Image: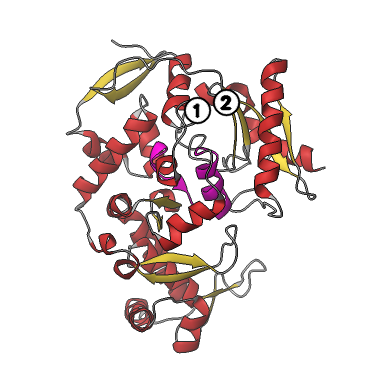
Amino acid sequence: MRTFDEAERRDRVGVRHALAPGHEASDVLGAAAAVVALHGTDPASTVLSAVLRAPGTSPDDVVTALYDDRSLVRVLSMRRTVFAVPPELAVACLGSSLAVAKDERRKLLKLLVLNGVADPEAHLARAEGEALEVFAQHESVTTTLLAETSPLLATRLMNGPPTDTWATEVSYASRILLVLSSSGQVVRGRPRGGWTSTQFAWSLSERWHPALAERPDLPTAARTLAEAWLRRYGPATLEDLQWWTGWTKTLTRQAVADLPLTDVDLQGAPGVVLADDLEPVPAPEPWVALLPALDPTIMGWKHRDHLHAAHKPQVFDVNGNAGPTVWADGRVVGGWAQRDDGEVVTHLLEDVGSETAAAVQVRAAHLTQLLGDVRLKARARGWTPVEKLLRA
């Protein structure tokens, strides 16, 4: 049985994730393809993950791809996470994540019952209908427009019993957008602000991009996504794939059932790789990288010991979300943060040698210049121990 040791798996990360010299992406789309899907819950991470893999590109190039060319689309799919992917892959993400849509619908129905709605199914159907009517009449829709147009969608809902001190009001309009976007009926459009903004306008999916009107069946969608992931993250375990997609164990096995896989040994753990992907990857030149929080590389596997060794507690928050990381030759060797004055500073968690440490500082200076007046925040996650240390 073919064995892949940690060093070979790290070499694959450098080469296939467009991080090692000579293997960088030539443009934003190439950067996205290198990791299958850019993490999109934090818009800043989407942009930085792309430009740091494609030298010569800028945040403006990512903005152009997302909102002008629309060669990348933000979709709410795997693990109830937003990803930025090409439209052709977006339909596979949505088609293979039907459980997310069902869960969002179930949660909203439960919320309606909590707020005293006698017939939540009929109530939700009416709300969906009114929302889609607004979308049919407007190219771009915001929660404010939904609330102004529909008294029903202007309703405020309590997300807990009135007796609970933690209960707060939530917008019906914002919750209906989660239902419609998880089912692929609407997508996030241009943000109301700069490239780090989390406030988006929305559009009907097929109006935003014609390719989004297609819907592959679940088996086809899951197979497409599984093969794309294995091309970039294999060899790996099926548990890794299940975690990344948020699928059930049954769906994960069904997704790979027709793929030409070979069983491999991941130094004692059973893994799989595509049958035509067994050849060793030539070791790349030494490389360093500063990757943003929630970057696809660090969030690509459930089992990541080959990447971060003993440093996980320092670079992940308490919920398992990765913060900004410093990499050397396929391993996490430290973390970084942006101070209030804009300077990007690093903290190495091991001795990497003077030459590598100097290269890390060059990357930090480049990132400081790239960010300019932009200030990063910890969105959809908590500050990591390294960030807290550097920002103190």
Residue 84, percent from left and from top: 43, 52
Amino acid on which the number 2 mark rests in the picture: His
Residue 270, percent from left and from top: 34, 19
Question: Badge 2 is on which residue?
Answer: 308
The crowd level at tag 1 (other Cα within 10 Å; few <14, some 14-19, many 20+) is some
Which label was assigned to residue 304? 1
Q: Is residue 151 visible?
A: no
Reply yes or no: does residue 47 show up in magenta. yes
SS type, badge 2:
helix
Residue 265, percent from left and from top: 35, 15
The crowd level at tag 2 (other Cα within 10 Å; few <14, some 14-19, many 20+) is some
Tell me whether circle 2 and circle 1 mark residues in contact (CB < 8 Å): yes
Quarter of the picture containing the C terminus is top right
Q: Please state which of residues 109 and 285 is positioned toward the viewer in this rendering.
A: 285
Q: Could you tell whether 338 is left or right of 222 in the image?
A: right
Q: Is residue 283 above or below residue 301?
A: above
Q: Could you tell whether 293 is left or right of 276 in the image?
A: right
Q: Please state which of residues 126 and 364 is positioned toward the viewer in this rendering.
A: 364
Q: Is residue 35 visible?
A: yes
Magenta residues, start to end: 33-54
Quarter of the picture containing the N terminus is top left
Q: Is residue 43 above or below residue 265?
A: below
